[in-house]
Amino acid sequence: MAAHESSSNTQATNHNSWDGSADFGIFQINSPYWCRNGDEGGSDVCQIPCSDLLSSNLSADVECTKIIAQDSNGMSAWVAWTSYGQGQDLWQYVEGCGV
């Protein structure tokens, strides 16, 4: 998913012209619903500044991704998941991870 969302770039930012939101980090987590980006409002479900998602330390990205995955829409929050991951055999990505 990271390869398709950000080309695995931890500092990737994408501004969405259709609603003024932005996507941050390796997993392209969207503001304002999932993270705080200045004064744009929103619900900040992950309770972090979006800038925390731009670090090479992926802790904030992983924790927020877990929260998103547990949401009612789950992984379908990402277009890359629905286009490239959902329903695919992904064993090579999780082999040895204990999942």
Image: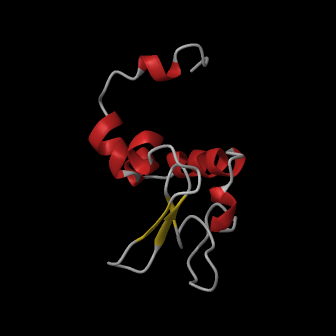
Instruction: Establish if 53 lies above or below 41.
Output: above
- Which residue does the image show at 43% across and 17% down from the upper left? 91
Q: How many marks?
A: 0
- Which residue does the image show at 52% across and 58% down from the upper left? 12
- Furthest-bottom residue in view? 39
- Which residue does the image show at 29% across and 30% down from the upper left? 87
Q: Quadrant of the C terminus?
A: top right
Instruction: Establish if 39 lies above or below 62.
Output: below
Quarter of the image holding residue 18? bottom left
Quarter of the image holding residue 81? top left
Q: Position of residue 38 (x, y in %)?
A: 64, 81
Q: Quadrant of the N terminus?
A: top left
Q: Position of residue 40 (x, y in %)?
A: 56, 84
Q: Nearer the viewer, residue 76 or 20?
A: 20
Instruction: Establish if 66 lies above or below 94.
Output: below
Taking 83 as reference, is 70 left or right?
right
Quarter of the image holding residue 36? bottom right
Instruction: Establish if 52 lies above or below 95.
Output: below
Is residue 90 in view? Answer: yes
- Which residue does the image show at 38% across and 73% down from the upper left? 16
